[in-house]
Amino acid sequence: MLNCSVERLDHLGIVAGVCREMGLVEYFDRLDEQVHARVSVGQAVLEMALNGLCLSYRRLYLVPQYFQHKPVERLIGPGITAEDINDDCLGRALDWLTAHDLTALFAGLAYQARRRFGVAAEVVQVDSTSVSVEGAYEREDLEANEALIRITYGYSRDQRADLKQWQLSLATTTSGVPSGLQLLDGNASGRTTLAQQVAEVV
């Protein structure tokens, strides 16, 4: 009898396949000027997308355990092992993302995906939600850096007025395909930000 091993793709195979068709890894790797020995920025972002569907609240150092019995090479790329997807690798990718304009990155990736899938964006829908957080979040450099969002009190959609928050605004086509993403201050007004985002996407 031949030796064989069984690895479970589950839903991750579908997600990885869609990411491959939209060119997610190539998109981020094209923007990264550094050469990485094992895992590229694009591959790390793909892993975090897969990880976010299952382990969004677990520590980064536990990620290799989750992928230990998953077909990592099929999901992420040739030559990649579960041990390669560690907290150092993911931390470097998060640092790279933080150093760039996340709104522009998302919009660029969404535009590339719409072109590849042939999705028109003639009509755009925009909605926002609030994310409550705990902690002080007092940043001395907020005034010097206008790109940083302000985590503060505001209208809480999850009924947690006692907690500070930040907001997330998402623009989609009528078929639900994302077109733009914007991080907002915790007290941002939807009357102005939603209209502004529609104008930027269209």
Image (spheres, helix red, strand yellow):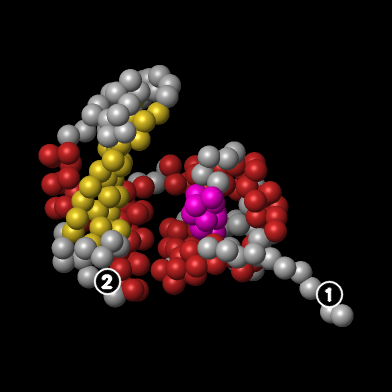
Q: Is residue 177 visible?
A: yes
The mark found on residue 119 in the picture is 2
Q: Is residue 34 visible?
A: no
Q: Quadrant of residue 132?
A: top left
Q: Position of residue 43 (x, y in %)?
A: 54, 59
Which SS does the magenta portion mostly show? helix
Of the two numbered discs 2 and 1 on the same chain, state the one appearing first in sequence. Answer: 1
Which residues lie in the magenta part? 43-54
Amino acid type at image mark 2: Val
The mark found on residue 3 in the picture is 1
Question: Residue shown at 45%/59% (left/top)?
Answer: 28
Q: Position of residue 159 (x, y in %)?
A: 30, 29
Is residue 99 or residue 134 the one in the foreground? 134
- For mark 2, give the secondary structure: loop
Identify the image quadrant of the C terminus.
bottom left
Q: Nearer the viewer, mark 2 or mark 1?
A: 1
Are dots 2 and 1 in contact, CB under 8 Å? no
